Image (spheres, grey):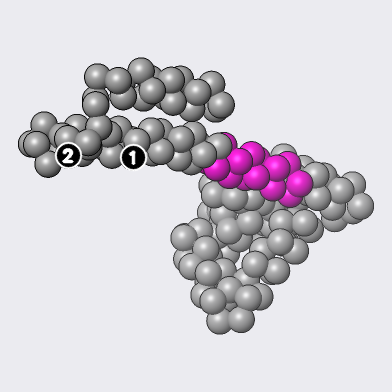
Amino acid sequence: MKGKTEAERKLYRSEGNKVIAGVAGGLGEYFNIDPVVVRLIFVAVTLLGGGGVIAYLIMWLVIPTQNSSEKALSQEVVHENAKDIANTARMYADEMNMKNTKKKENKGSGKFGWLLLILGILLLISNLGWFRMVDWERFWPLVLVVLGLYFLAK
């Protein structure tokens, strides 16, 4: 912000240099330091007592964005920032739900993999002559029925 006097500088949340809400980017631009340093300070304060998260949330709530920096701190700005916090929380919650859904889908394929592994081991043992009690020619239709029921149940 070279060329601007002290009176012209305003604190705002950065729109271009943000990871979550632009608080650290805005503080970095305001104090003319790297925003990574500001982020590290937030992390350190959080690890030392938890105040970093609370301070970040309060700043997110009261500091206007670059686009709305002309507005003075008012209920309107706080209301807009509260909506922004809620939208961001929903976005992260949706991402977590998508990840959990993918994990659940992968669990089903893991069960199928275990089933195939056990079946393969039984067939190998049978071919080696160690397990002749089962008549595998009559066992195959049962395996196909169980697999069909398994996939239909999903």
Q: Position of residue 74 (x, y in %)?
A: 90, 53
Q: Nearer the viewer, residue 57 or 66?
A: 57
Q: Which residues are magenta?
A: 85-100
For label 2, the SS is loop
Q: Position of residue 154 (x, y in %)?
A: 55, 27
Q: Position of residue 11 (x, y in %)?
A: 69, 57
**Crowding near the residue tagged with mark 2, few <14, some 14–19, many ≥20 C-alpha atoms within 10 Å:** few
Q: Nearer the viewer, residue 138 or 120?
A: 138
Q: Farthest residue toward the left?
A: 128
Q: Would you say residue 120 is visible in this rendering? A: no
Q: Farthest residue toward the bottom?
A: 48
Real-space Cα separation, disc 2 to disc 1, in angstroms: 20 Å
- Identify residue for label 1: 114
For label 1, the SS is helix
- Identify residue for label 2: 131
Q: Would you say residue 2 is visible in this rendering? A: yes
